Amino acid sequence: MSPELPASALYSHPSLARLWKKVHLACSPFILRPTVRQLYSQPAPLLRSHLKTQPYHVVALGCAEGHKESLLLRKLPPPSHLTTADTSLAMATIAARKLPAKRKSAKKLDLTSPSSLSRVLQSHSNLPPPTRLLTLFGVLPNLDPLPLLSQLAKSLHPCDLLLFSTNLAPGENPRAGAVRILPQYENPPTRRWLEAAARRYRPRLPQGQLVFQINSDPRQTSLARIEARWISSRSTKIIFSSRRPTAPQVEAWLRSCKLLRLGRWIEPRGEEGLWLVRSHPSLGRDPKPRKG
Ligand SMILES: C[S@@+](CC[C@H](N)C(=O)[O-])C[C@H]1O[C@@H](n2cnc3c(N)ncnc32)[C@H](O)[C@@H]1O
């Protein structure tokens, strides 16, 4: 039995997406703290200066119902084309309905599959080639960050922009920072959501209980992960994990993926940050030419 549930298994069934939405409304700092919401409109002035070659396209990756994108797009000229993409097509469809754009489409996406990502990004390839603004909000904590950022870096054309957010471990020590924000996860609505995901898992998990812990990421041991593990007398399965890098760890990911930072915004408590990046011009990426 693989020790970890894929993150998509927590959202792709409509009943789980509904439970996650309850968690989001009850516990998310984005809902509870105005300073976190403000973060999502702060990149707008810098983006406007980069997007002067209008029209531009927006591809909202892992967007759920698009609340964060909505705060950002409110401050930008409407894109000529918008694609919303998520493992939950139901949520991506709601986001597409809500967000402003002249033309829109919603797609099912698996961010862990390069071919799925490339299909979503290629849906733009027969349109005239203006700048694409890719957004990736709240997703990096749930997925292995380096393969995802490096796949995105390979997919970026020279004029494309990537704006991503990540949850951070506040302070300098990743583990101590993760301890401070553990109550955002260890609470009844989150437990209900994750226990429902454990019940849906096949083959069925043995009788056990959900235990929240802070562990090191197995692929980057200096990185703290908040985990919810289903522990039984026979086995342990990781149901959920949220990586909590420090800002310097995010910067190191960018260097290793050859992404150039254009801007960075961090909310006052240091628990969430946004990075605007593009492919590194001097590192000679050779993106595939677009069709059409
Ligand atoms: C924590 S939620 C964040 C949602 C929203 N972007 C926000 O910040 O409020 C993670 C999102 O990633 C999506 N997701 C998880 N795994 C995914 C995958 N493998 N491919 C695409 N989307 C995925 C989920 O459906 C969910 O919408």
Image (cartoon, rainbow, N blue to C red):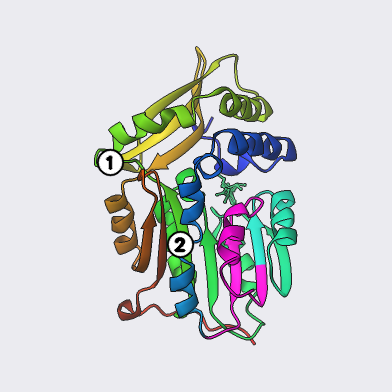
The residue segment tinted magenta is 53-82
Q: Which residue is mark 1?
A: 171
The residue type indicated by label 2 comes to: Gln
As drawn, 274 above or below 73: above
Q: Residue 120, percent across and down? A: 63, 66
Kindly tell me whether residue 244 is visible in this rendering.
yes
Q: Residue 123, percent across and down? A: 66, 72
The residue type indicated by label 1 comes to: Gly
User: How far is the residue under mark 2 from the one under mark 1?
Assistant: 22 Å
Q: Check residue 71 for magenta coloring.
A: yes
Check residue 42 in the rendering and tell me which mark sits there, or answer none.
2
Question: Quadrant location of the N terminus?
Answer: top right
The reply to whether callout 2 and callout 1 are in contact (CB within 8 Å) is no
As drawn, 180 above or below 114: above
Return the disc, 2 or 1, that comes first in the chain's sequence: 2
Q: Residue 95, percent across and down? A: 69, 56
Q: Is residue 79 left or right of residue 135?
A: right
